[in-house]
């Protein structure tokens, strides 16, 4: 076996090992750390990720209900989506219409060919100073019509888009395997989003409601007074931004908060 084949076999085994570690992770913080470490081996220094379960049309829904992760600019990523600028970009249109990966050079080629709308061109100009690296966008396949996840992978500062595009075919399968496994695992775990940070007690009470228990049943099961149960339920509704307990159960389920274990990801909720 040639040395190149040896390297490829070793790389494949490393990727499989990392994919298995991600699959066995029990919290989003660990998944993220494993993903970032795995991508760094392929020359991607910066990673941004977003996951919504409240997509409506072309909107990601309330940004407070969206999970954003970033290795370097989380506040900027949140601001980009809170402002609504993302909806005007050609990259976002591509993410909605496609599954897979695309070079960041795509948008320049589309503009040169006259295939971007005036609004997309304006958004591109507005963002020009914030994107100076070469990179790849990844759009994930989803099982639900209100779900959407996407990722941006930025190469090192010294690598051109042409150089990245030239080596992408060789590394794409391994990179996408890592990204897809991380996305699938994150989609399975409780999402620590600003609009869904329930306490352990609040989750417990909503679990009992989802289980079909009455307030009197819950009082017996928990040892809490009816007034204490109502107080916790009210706080849960306020946290989730809903009006009824039934709506709270539905939204908590949407965010994978129902029947979850102990409080998750303290590092991400700070």
Image (cartoon, rainbow, N blue to C red):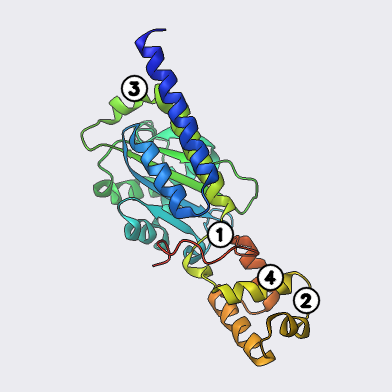
What residue is drawn where x is 51% and y is 48%? 25
Q: Secondary structure at mark 1?
A: loop
Q: Secondary structure under badge 2?
A: loop
**Separation of marks 3 and 1 at Cα, in angstroms:** 38 Å
How many numbered tags mark residues here?
4
Q: Give residue 227's position: percent from left, percent from top.
A: 65, 92
Query: On the image, numbered disc 3 is attached to which residue?
Result: 166
Mark 3: give few (<14), some (14-19) or many (20+) Cα within 10 Å: few
* Circle 2 Cα neighbour tier, 10 Å, few/some/many (<14 / 14–19 / ≥20): some
- Locate residue 42: give its quadrant: top left
Which mark is on residue 213? 2
Reading the image, the residue beneath label 4 is 207
x, y percentage for residue 193? 49, 64
Label 1 or label 2, whichever comes before in sequence order: 1
* Residue 95 visible in image: yes
Between circles 2 and 3, the one closer to the viewer is 2
């Amino acid at each position: 076996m040639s040395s190149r084949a040896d390297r490829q076999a070793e790389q494949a085994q490393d990727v499989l090992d990392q994919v298995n570690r991600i699959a066995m992770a029990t919290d989003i913080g660990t998944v993220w750390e494993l993903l970032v470490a795995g991508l760094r081996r392929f020359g991607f220094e910066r990673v941004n990720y977003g996951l919504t379960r409240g997509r409506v049309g072309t909107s990601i829904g309330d940004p407070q209900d969206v999970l954003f992760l970033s290795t370097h600019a989380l506040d900027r990523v949140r601001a980009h989506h809170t402002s609504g600028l993302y909806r005007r970009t050609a990259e976002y249109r591509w993410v909605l219409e496609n599954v897979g990966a695309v070079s960041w050079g795509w948008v320049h080629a589309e503009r040169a060919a006259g295939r971007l709308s005036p609004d997309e061109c304006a958004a591109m100009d507005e963002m020009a100073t914030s994107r100076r690296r070469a990179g790849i966008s990844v759009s994930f396949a989803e099982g639900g019509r209100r779900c959407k996840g996407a990722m941006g992978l930025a190469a090192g500062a010294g690598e051109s888009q042409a150089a990245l595009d030239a080596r992408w075919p060789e590394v794409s399968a391994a990179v996408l395997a890592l990204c897809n496994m991380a996305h699938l695992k994150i989609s399975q775990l409780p999402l620590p989003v600003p609009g869904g940070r329930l306490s352990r007690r609040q989750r417990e009470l909503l679990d009992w409601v989802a289980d079909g228990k009455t307030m009197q049943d819950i009082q017996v099961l928990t040892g809490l007074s009816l007034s204490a149960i109502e107080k916790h339920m009210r706080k849960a509704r306020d946290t989730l931004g809903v009006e009824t307990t039934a709506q709270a159960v539905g939204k908590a389920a949407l965010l994978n908060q129902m029947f979850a274990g102990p409080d998750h990801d303290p590092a991400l909720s700070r």
